[in-house]
Image (spheres, grey):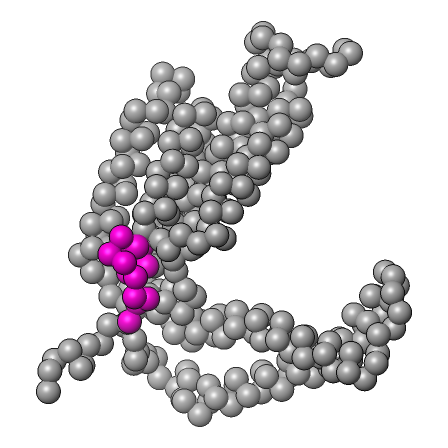
Amino acid sequence: MSATAFNPYASFTVTSPRQFLYGLNPLAKIIAVAPVMVLLVVVRDLATPTAFIALSYALVLIGTRVTARTLLILFAAMPVGILVIGVSFSVWVDAAGVDGTAPVLQIGTWTLFAGALELGFATALRLGAIVALALIGGLTTTGPDLVRASVQQLRLPYRIGYTALAAFRFVPRFGYELSVIRAAHRVRGHHGGRGPLARIARGWGYIVPLLASAIRHAERVALAMDSRAFGAHPTRTERHLVPFRRRDAAFLVLFLLASAVIFAVFFPWQLG
């Protein structure tokens, strides 16, 4: 019998070799971006966060399966969010601190200075860079693999990891149960009229059956975990392993090197 029949490693999503982010260990993607996200909190210039946004976009477009949802996030939601936050923060900047810069817009006695725009968009770009870096792992990592990697590499107690995972799984289950309850109410003709008050009344009617369904689901989950001796031993064997491979270490080192280059080139060190 071939040795491949006993391959213990987790079966990642089959993708093109270009979509390499799916095959990386979740911890490698988190550890790579975490230091940069922390440093971006104290960055105040425009060039540094812009460079990290470009780096994140390049990795997402090359290393993921590009879908309409991904394109919508990258080229619609992100730019609009940065624009709105930048303008909003610019309006709230104290004019006394930036009145030495050139005026951009004047309405009556109120003046918008270039310094206020710079501060506002520096904050917006900083937030946008943090979100863009989070997309590198967020778009290519599943909850179960993250829990497995945390248990196997970070030695997180499996009781905590898999309990948290089971709790997260309750959310989509509640969504499904709510759709079933709504369909049952519609079949029985419990429309309750229209308008905001009617919607509140219908929502109130969903609480009791949804709570009963949640209790039943929790009992079934607890019974399933007990039947598998969950928590009976300090360690637990894994059916799927999520190892930390050489490609994970290579990605981590290369990303940190690229981040160091960006800080060295774009960060205005003379302002420190």
Residue at image coords 30%, 78%: 238
Question: Does the segment drawn in magenta span residue 97?
Answer: no
As drawn, 154 above or below 106: below
Q: Is residue 33 in sight in this rendering?
A: no
**Count of all numbered marks drawn on residues in the image:** 0
As drawn, 72 above or below 90: below
Foreground: 21 or 88?
Answer: 21
Question: Does the segment drawn in magenta span residue 14?
Answer: yes
Q: Give x and y (percent) for residue 120.
A: 57, 26
Q: Give x and y (percent) for residue 172.
A: 57, 71
Residue at image coords 55%, 43%: 77
Report the predominant secondary structure element of the magenta stretch.
Answer: loop
Residue at image coords 28%, 71%: 10
Residue 103 occupies which quadrant of the picture? top right
Question: Is residue 233 rendered to the left or right of residue 87?
Answer: left
Q: Is residue 37 in sight in this rendering?
A: yes
Foreground: 236 or 263?
Answer: 263
Q: What is the span of residues highlighted in magenta in the rendered image?
A: 11-23
Residue at image coords 27%, 37%: 258
Question: Is residue 158 rendered to the left or right of residue 198?
Answer: left
Q: Give x and y (percent) for residue 96.
A: 65, 13
Residue furthest bottom as drawn: 227
Foreground: 254 or 1?
Answer: 1
Question: Is residue 217 rendered to the left or right of residue 133?
Answer: right
Which image quarter holds the C terminus? Answer: top left
Question: Is residue 196 rendered to the left or right of residue 125?
Answer: right
Which image quarter holds the N terminus? Answer: bottom left
Q: Give x and y (percent) for residue 62.
A: 32, 47
